[in-house]
Image (cartoon, helix red, strand yellow):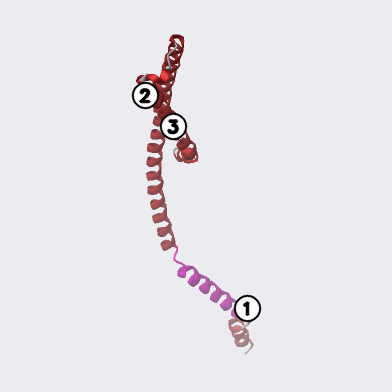
Amino acid sequence: MNTKNTVFSRLFGKQFRSELSASDDIQTAINDINALDLESGLSELRSSESDLNNIVSQAQSIARDFLAKYDGLEDVLNGYRDKRDQLEQALVSFDGMASDLGIDPEQSEAYRNGQEAFTNAENKATDISRLQNELFELYELANELNR
């Protein structure tokens, strides 16, 4: 009978119940892990990554176009300033010659047209410079996008 009790106590003793409890913990953990939907999360993340890459690619393309136009405008503005300076020099020269002859330069239609064109050129150059200053942060961001 002693052998029977020994076997029985080993089968249903404290250690066996601990093992059963640990087995239940393992099964619960397995069930919890299986309940998590990692594939769905990964799929959503990959989809978002793809969307973001597409948007960044589009933004880079738009930024390159913006940079080209901004830099192109700067080149045009520099040429414009050169022409404006030539006009200013011609007006100063005309004014000096008219003064030497004792003539009021304002009586000349060409001089008045030149002054008007010079004033318009100054205003346009100022407007363009102001716009460039307003857009400079965007210009910097566009440069960052294309690094």
Residue 89 location (% of width, % of height): 44, 16
Q: Amino acid type of disc 3?
A: Asn
State which region is magenta.
15-38
**Depth order, front residue of 128/15:** 128
Residue 145 location (% of width, % of height): 45, 41
**Residue marked by disc 3:** 123
User: Toward which corner of the image does residue 43 lie, by quadrant?
Assistant: bottom left
Disc on res. 15 = 1
**Residue marked by disc 2:** 113
Q: Does residue 117 belong to the magenta stretch?
A: no
Q: Amino acid type of disc 2?
A: Asn
Instruction: Tell me the chief SS of the magenta region.
Output: helix
Q: Amino acid type of disc 1?
A: Gln
**Depth order, front residue of 58/138:** 138
Vertical placement of 83 versus 36: above or below?
above
Lower sequence index among marks 2 and 1: 1
Q: Do the residues labelled 2 and 1 touch (CB within 8 Å)?
A: no
Secondary structure beneath label 3: helix
Is residue 86 in view from this perspective?
no
Lower sequence index among marks 2 and 3: 2
- Which mark's residue is nearer the viewer, 2 or 3? 2
Q: The N terminus appears in which quarter of the rendering? A: bottom right
Residue at 44% in and 28% down: 122
Disc on res. 27 = none
- Packing grade of label 2 (10 A; few <14, some 14-19, many >=20) is few
Secondary structure beneath label 1: helix
What whole-number distance in Å separates the C-alpha atoms at marks 2 and 1?
109 Å
Q: Does residue 24 belong to the magenta stretch?
A: yes
Residue at 61% in and 78% down: 18
